[in-house]
Amino acid sequence: MSMGAYDEEEHERREQKTAAVDVSTDDDRTHYEGKVEYDSGDSAEALLDQFKQIKSSR
């Protein structure tokens, strides 16, 4: 059989394999508690100025 040739048996084997879904207890969702903090950094104007500088140096 050449590369890329259609193999019906392989197709059926893969179809059966993907049709059987194993659901285990590891699939339970985990509840997270806490908070998220982030630093917004520079203002929008400062970022636009930086962008303009980068574009003008090209």
Image (tube, helix red, strand yellow):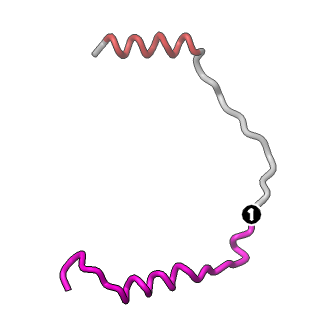
Task: Tell which residue pokes out farthest to the bottom in this image.
Answer: 9
Task: Indicate the quadrant where residue 56 lies.
Answer: top left
Q: Is 2 left, or right, of 38 in this rendering?
A: left
What residue do we see at 71% from left, 34% from top? Answer: 37
What residue do we see at 81% from left, 50% from top? Answer: 33
Front residue (pair 9, 28): 9
Residue range highlighted in magenta: 1-29
Front residue (pair 7, 33): 7
Task: Tell which residue pokes out farthest to the left in this image.
Answer: 2
Relative to 33, residue 24 above or below: below
What residue do we see at 35% from left, 15% from top? Answer: 55
Is-magenta flag for residue 16? yes
What residue do we see at 45% from left, 82% from top? Answer: 14
Relative to 8, residue 35 above or below: above
Q: Is 33 left, or right, of 42 in this rendering?
A: right
At label 1, which amino acid type do we have? Arg
Classify the position of the N terminus by image quarter.
bottom left
- The crowd level at tag 1 (other Cα within 10 Å; few <14, some 14-19, many 20+) is few
Residue 40 x, y percent position in the rendering: 63, 25
Front residue (pair 5, 52): 5
Is-magenta flag for residue 47? no
Element type at marker 1? loop
Residue 48 x, y percent position in the rendering: 49, 13
Relative to 11, residue 32 above or below: above
Mark 1 lies on residue: 29
Classify the position of the C terminus by image quarter.
top left
